Amino acid sequence: MLTDFSNLGQVQISPWEDLFKHYFPMGLAALVVSLVATPICRVIALKWQIVDRPDTFLKPHERPIPYLGGIAIYLGWLGGILFAVLYLDLNMDNGFLIGLGVAGLLTMLVGLFDDLRFMPPKVKLACNIAIALFLLWLGLGNEMVQVVTHIMRVDMSGSDRWLQLAYSVPIMVFIVVGACNATNLIDGMDGLCTGVLGIISIGFLILAGHLRLYSDLPVDNERLVLAVAMLGAAAGFLPFNINPAKIFMGDAGSMLLGLNAAILMLLFAEEKSIRWMMGALMVFGLPIADMLLTLARRWRNGRPLMEGDRSHFYDQLRDRGYTVRQVVAISYLLTIGFVLSGLSVIVFRTRHAILLILLTVAASVVAVWKFNMVSIDPRSPAGSGDTDTEKKGVGL
């Protein structure tokens, strides 16, 4: 019997390696564009004095820091998406991706106007709602409502279009507005929002990659494109944003990153199983947790929900003596913990994964109670140092 030695010496490429090689060029494109655009935006901001000036409360950084980092992040993000549309042979709806690029542009411009001129929270909220409705018009969320109403034990079989819209609109608005504000609120220290969203994008990438490679469900490539574009754009901006920051992303960048995360969570929610929606929400867990803590703390202390403060979890860590870099490192570790909890949906059966997610949520609640993070007076000043601070309250 003859032995076939034809495959001897050939290296077998794993599915993940093949996926990496396929999407690496677009991620590199996003990174390079962001890396090149950031110092250019910094020079323009300094020339035109588009800077964030320190104050005695919400902006304790020691010197004026240029804005416009959000433009660089958008250019990197859009560059990655356009690279995928133009050069990658992927089975995806290019028109839908271009529409998402327009939604990202609108979000970035809303944030940029807020950075430059100040936009009243109610006006910014209205703009976010309009962008959410634009996403719904693009077709995002059409399947998601079926999953959510199933969880709510609402029978949507045979329902007309208007009834589906009645459920879709508030869900879309809630997720888009919530995610944009969550990332805005966590943009409170040098490198914090950028690094946290970079780690979250890796979590989304793994979740999307698993669906692409191993799931029997019908999947699309848009999730992978958005996750890789977000990762590349954040990675290109981070070297200029770590402490001490050379440039801030402002609301233009934080809201854009939040929008991208919202779109990804909505896309995962369109799968015909609760596990993927729960996993995606948990991957985005740290910004969600900080936003909920913010609202609870302001309500508990009788403060306006839309009024900014410096008593976020990262501010409280600064007050306990940690340096800015130590707080950011702790935040990265917490983000990794939430991401790993969310990724449990690709390892365990649904009920076991949801149990682990609930245990993570319970542990977070216990930690908040243990360290008394809700009762602290939000008018107390935060620690000193170069910090990229939120300047306004949540637009909810």
Image (spheres, rainbow, N blue to C red):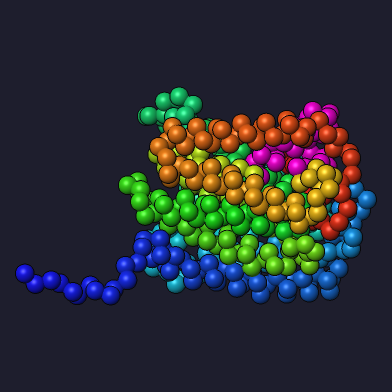
Indicate yes or no whether the magenta region holds residue 190: no
**In front: 46, or 334?**
334
Indicate yes or no whether the magenta region holds residue 291: yes
Q: Quadrant of residue 66?
A: bottom right
Left or right placement of residue 105 versus residue 165 in this view:
right
The boundaries of the magenta stretch are 287-313
Q: Name the quarter where the N terminus is drawn.
A: bottom left
Residue 307: image location, x then y, percent: 82, 40
Q: Quadrant of residue 72?
A: bottom right
In the rendered image, the vertical position of residue 5 relative to residue 369, given as above or below:
below
Residue 169: image location, x then y, percent: 56, 37
Residue 56 visible in the snapshot? yes
Query: Which residue does the image show at 68% across and 64% down from the upper left?
Result: 238
Query: Which residue does the image show at 78% across and 74% down from the upper left?
Result: 43
Residue 13: image location, x then y, percent: 35, 67
**In front: 205, or 358?**
358
Query: Which residue does the image show at 84% across and 74% down from the upper left?
Result: 47
Residue 342: image location, x then y, percent: 52, 43
Query: Which residue does the image show at 61% across and 31% down from the upper left?
Result: 362
Q: Quadrant of residue 158?
A: top left
Marks counted in the figure total 0
Residue 78 visible in the snapshot? no
In the rendered image, the vertical position of residue 372 relative to residue 137, given as above or below:
above
In this view, which residue lies farthest toward the right?
Answer: 56
**In front: 313, or 236?**
313
Left or right placement of residue 271 versus residue 123 in this view:
left
Q: Name the quarter where the C terminus is drawn.
A: top right
In the rendered image, the vertical position of residue 389 relative to residue 279, given as above or below:
below
